[in-house]
Image (cartoon, rainbow, N blue to C red):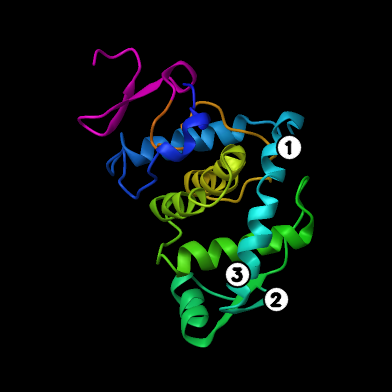
Amino acid sequence: MKLLFENWRKFLLTERLALKPGPNGWDKYRELVAKAYDEAPIFDQNAVSEFEAIEPFVEKMFQRISSRVEVQFVDEDPYPGPKEMCQDAMQNGILKIWNGGTEHQVFDPEINLKLRAVHDYMTHCQRNTDFTLKGEIASYNAHMKTVPPSAAGALFTEVVGQAAFFLDRGYFPPQKIAILPGFDFVNVGEVDPEITGYILNPETKELELASQPQ
């Protein structure tokens, strides 16, 4: 599947979902993404430039949200869920971010923490999305409207890849510097049948084995 980044701005990123809920819809997609994340290398040198392309976006957006909310980096996980986090941010003007687990092979700890703050405020709070796969994909789509095309693969790994792994396996995965093959980073839900073994049926909005007749 060739991603036509040269025609990037011709794509309209929306919340219209390509798949429907259920075992052959988003559940199967979550499983495929989690598998790809699990099989991806811990560090792929060829992916570094895509992760580095995220950094200017993070700096710009962190400066923007800092004019609206006071970001506090704290030692303990500050909220039981997105509802409490966003109430604090939107009503009290305070957004607390856990400052642990900042080890990253490309981002320094400051960038990593700023990315968390940008992600939580811009998507979960401003767009009222939860921590489900649907919520994280909506968050990813929101980021994609502002990041450069060269950052798409890295952003998919950071947001959709990690969320899919956690929701599928029940624990947080190791941080990986890699681009996940077989997925369309613009039209989320589309997969490459030659890599994943599945194909999206646009009529049923389900993923089918690629060997099945369409």
Give the residue at mark 2.
Answer: 74
Could you say which quadrant of the image residue 197 lies in? Answer: top left
Camera-near label (2 vs 1) is: 1
Give the residue at mark 3.
Answer: 64
* Residue in the image at 51% along x and 64% along y: 122
Tell me the CA gap for discs 2 and 1.
29 Å
Question: Is disc 3 surrounded by few (<14), some (14 to 19) or many (20+) residues within 10 Å?
Answer: few
Three-letter amino acid code of the residue under disc 2 = Val
Could you say which quadrant of the image residue 113 lies in? Answer: bottom right
Q: Is residue 197 magenta?
A: yes
Question: Is disc 2 surrounded by few (<14), some (14 to 19) or many (20+) residues within 10 Å?
Answer: few
Q: Is residue 142 magenta?
A: no
- Image height of 129 relative to 190, above or below: below
Give the residue at mark 1.
Answer: 48
- Drawn side of residue 112 relative to residue 6, left or right: right
Three-letter amino acid code of the residue under disc 3 = Arg
Three-letter amino acid code of the residue under disc 1 = Val
Q: Decide: marks 3, 2 in contact (CB < 8 A)?
A: no
Q: Which residues are magenta?
A: 192-214
Pinpoint residue 49: horizontal percent, then vertical percent.
72, 37
Question: Is disc 1 surrounded by few (<14), some (14 to 19) or many (20+) residues within 10 Å?
Answer: some
